[in-house]
Image: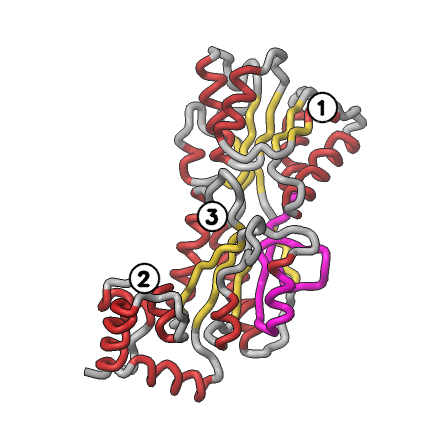
Amino acid sequence: MKDSKLTIKDISQMTGYSIRTVSRVINNNPNVKESTRNKIEKVLKETGFETNIFAKSLRKKTMNNIMIVIEKQKNTYPGQWYSILFQKIIDKAAEYDYNVFMTEYISEQKNPFNGMHLLKSGFVDGAIIFNIKENDKKVKIFQQAGIPFVTIGETNSKTPFVATDSFSGMYQATNHLIKNGLTDIVLMLGNLQYTLNIKRKKGYIKAFEDNKIKINENNILINIRTFQDTYNYCKNMKKIPHGIIISGDEKAFGALKALNERNINIPDNISIIGYDNIPLSNFSTPALTTVEQPVDEIVEKSFKMLLDLINEKDVDTEILIPVKLIKRDTTR
């Protein structure tokens, strides 16, 4: 029975295979087992799905497929904030009858991008790209392919982006501690190749400069990537700073655990600030002061920008979203 309203997700559920595997069969990708290909092609033929999607694309000049591109980082994984963001993008796409595919960019590999065949096939209308670096190679792939894209985070080139104000967020966090009389403040950041970490470092420095306080460069720690890293640091540090600002709520939980185990009172003896305001941050012990990144606004604005670019509309291609400090129990 043929149904013109079927989506790739429907075919995936009907066959029991992943959306990625279904898309490979549709695009005649050789990396599919013959038995799997036969089963999927049988369903495609019975439903008329392949005919439907290509007929629709000829009429609308779109395939209604959007790619999410993430950069796989060694020994780390997408945390709760990213998981929430991805799910909300999928939900938003569904409102507009778009399918969403997720692909990885693994810089350590000889061929780091596993979605090139989808770009070449014309199967992808646009992309939302995460984990942005300066001179980002992921961005260049889409520029060369001529496919519309939006980055979540700023680049140092004129490319469409939606970003939260990382400079302001870190400035607010640092300034809050300074105004409470705390000046020995450790900053924990990830890899400084990523633009958001560069901007957060600048926000931290500016807060000290505006308050005419000399910075201790040894207090700026980089490549702090996991809650295990923060746990180890706080468990073993000999000198207790006035405060620690950690770029990521989940990493902050590692610090809280170590400090609680050492019976170091928070916030009387040390203040802790995280970043993201994931739902769990309100349930830590003590409840975590953090910088909120408004997920719904990020999704709404990035998806609208991408649709406008796909439909060749005039659009503001640089959106910087304000953030705010959420004060809870880990600071005074």
On the image, the x and y values in percent for residue 205 come to 74, 34
> Mark 1 and mark 2 in contact (Cβ < 8 Å)?
no
Please state which amino acid type lies under the numbered disc 1: Asn
Q: Amino acid at mark 3?
A: Tyr
Q: Is residue 35 left or right of residue 121?
A: left
**Disc 3, SS:** helix
| Residue 268 sits above or below residue 228 on the image | above
Q: Measure the C-alpha gap from mark 2 to mark 1.
A: 48 Å
Residue 246, position in %: x, y? Answer: 57, 32
Which tag, 2 or 3, sits closer to the chain's start?
2
Return the residue at label 1: 218
- The residue under label 3 is 82
| Badge 1 density bin: few <14, some 14–19, many ≥20, Cα 10 Å | few
- Closer to the chain start, of discs 2 and 1, is 2
40 vs 265: above or below: below
- The residue under the point 55% across, 25% down is 272
Q: Earlier in the sequence, mark 1 or mark 3?
A: 3
Q: Residue at image x 28%, y 76%?
A: 41
Q: Of helix, strand and loop, which one carries label 2?
A: loop
